[in-house]
Image (tube, rainbow, N blue to C red):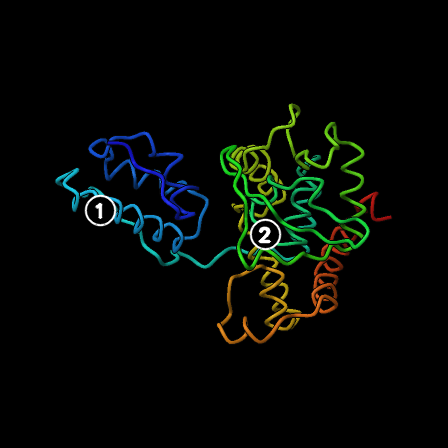
Amino acid sequence: MELRKRTDPALNRWILPRWGHSLLEQVKPVDVEEWLRFLLLAPQSKANIRSLFHLIYVDARRWEMTDSNPIDLVRQSAGRRRIPRTLSPWEIGLLLRQLAEPYRTMVLVAACLGLRASEIVGLQWGDFNWEDLTLLVKWSVVHGRVADTKTEASQLPLPIDPRLARTLREHWKRSLHRRSEDWVFGNLEGSPRWQESILHRQLRPATLGAGLGKIGWHTFRHSYSTLLRSLRVDLKVQQELLRHSTIQSTMNIYTRAMPKQKRAANRLVVGRLFRAARRKGRLLAVAS
């Protein structure tokens, strides 16, 4: 019997695309472990997906659809195996020198806004408000599958620094696809790119060329968060810029960062990054 669609977002986004057409008895523990290993998610998120998958089989056993639960044998830790890698503004400047377009602009967006890889490839031109210099992140694209990011934390717009806005406008001029519904970083056919391919074919060779070792897409989000903390940005402002769901419930209910605070904090981060790029002798033309 095939897995049935439920309302859980993790099921619809992760489990169904890979396992939705599998019979219950066809799902094997080793195959699930291998699949989880290559998902670009934090260990806790993978553990949550495993738990949900386990509950599917609990329900199936209750209704006598199967006699076993293969997810019992799937190993997935919720803890981190190592301290997350971060890059300094100077190191990001080194990396930018190694990248051609559009990958240089993609990394600049990742470093200046702390977006997830799936959100970067899911950006559309219509998501930007150029008059207010804001961005509303609406879409997440994984393996070519588009999903919305309609969570409470994602409903607030992000500030776009004028320097980053100029970079994006220059990218728009170079792009073959410029309509509001077009993907900002689409491929030649206008379809969303795959973040894994960019990571392996572009980013990792560039980091090796810059002498920075191995990184992942989430390195830029960790670096953005670390830089905000080093600049002593208010904790609530950090939360809203990173679009984390909560610091603690009382702060979510009674406190909200003012837009001016968020814009000022983001300006500090972008300023550090652009100055680092200039110090390496490669002034971005759009920032001149």
Under circle 1, the secondary element is helix
Quarter-wise, where is residue 74 in the image?
Answer: top left
Foreground pick, 24 / 46: 24
Classify 10 Å Cα crowding around label 1: few (below 14), some (14-19), many (20 and above).
Answer: few
* Residue ranking furthest to the right: 288
Quarter-wise, where is residue 160 in the image?
Answer: bottom right
Mark seen at residue 28:
none
Q: Which residue is mark 1?
A: 59
Q: Position of residue 35 (x, y in %)?
A: 35, 38
- Residue at image position (53%, 33%) is 197
Q: Amino acid at mark 2?
A: Phe
Q: Position of residue 114 (x, y in %)?
A: 61, 54
Q: Position of residue 278 (x, y in %)?
A: 79, 51
Whether residue 267 is situated above or below residue 97 in the rendered picture: below
Whether residue 45 is situated above or below residue 70 in the rendered picture: below
Q: Position of residue 22 (x, y in %)?
A: 29, 30
- Residue at image position (54%, 44%) is 148
